[in-house]
Image (cartoon, rainbow, N blue to C red):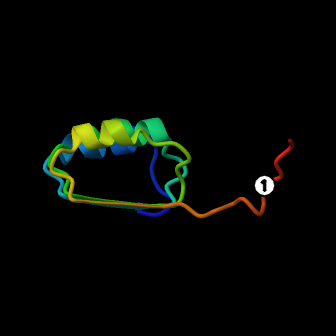
Amino acid sequence: MVHFGNDSLYSYIAQRSSNLRCLRLAMCYPLTGNGFVSAVMKLSFLEELDISQGYTQLDLKAIGHSCPLLKTFKLNRPSFSRFVKYDA
């Protein structure tokens, strides 16, 4: 899914799809990091998780504990450092 959904929708999907084995998300900006982790915590049979662009903070420890069968975890976040000005 790309640019689609919010915390409520993903929570609903996770509740209805607890046997889900693979999840791939790309640029799901309406979904918050906390909402995402809350949904993933309901997917204990998840074996593959692929996240591309969009999350600044994820509780990886919570994801790892909630998904004991996780074999593959991919997190692809672009670097925006050249666009951000840091003040010292």
Can residue 20 be seen at all in this image of the molecule?
yes
Q: Quadrant of the N terminus?
A: bottom left
Q: Residue at x 48, y 45 (%)?
A: 31
Residue 50 placement: quadrant? bottom left
Dot 1 corresponds to which residue?
84
Can residue 42 be seen at all in this image of the molecule?
no
Callout 1: 10 Å neighbours few (<14), some, many (20+)? few
Q: Quadrant of the C terminus?
A: top right
Q: Residue at x 13, y 50 (%)?
A: 19
Q: Residue at x 36, y 45 (%)?
A: 10
- 44 above or below 20? above
Q: Is residue 16 left or right of residue 50?
A: left
Residue 15 placement: quadrant? top left
Residue 6 screen position, x and y as percent: 46, 44
Residue 35 screen position, x and y as percent: 42, 37
Of 4 and 48, nearer the camera is 48
What kind of residue is marked 1?
Answer: Val
Q: Residue at x 59, y 64 (%)?
A: 78
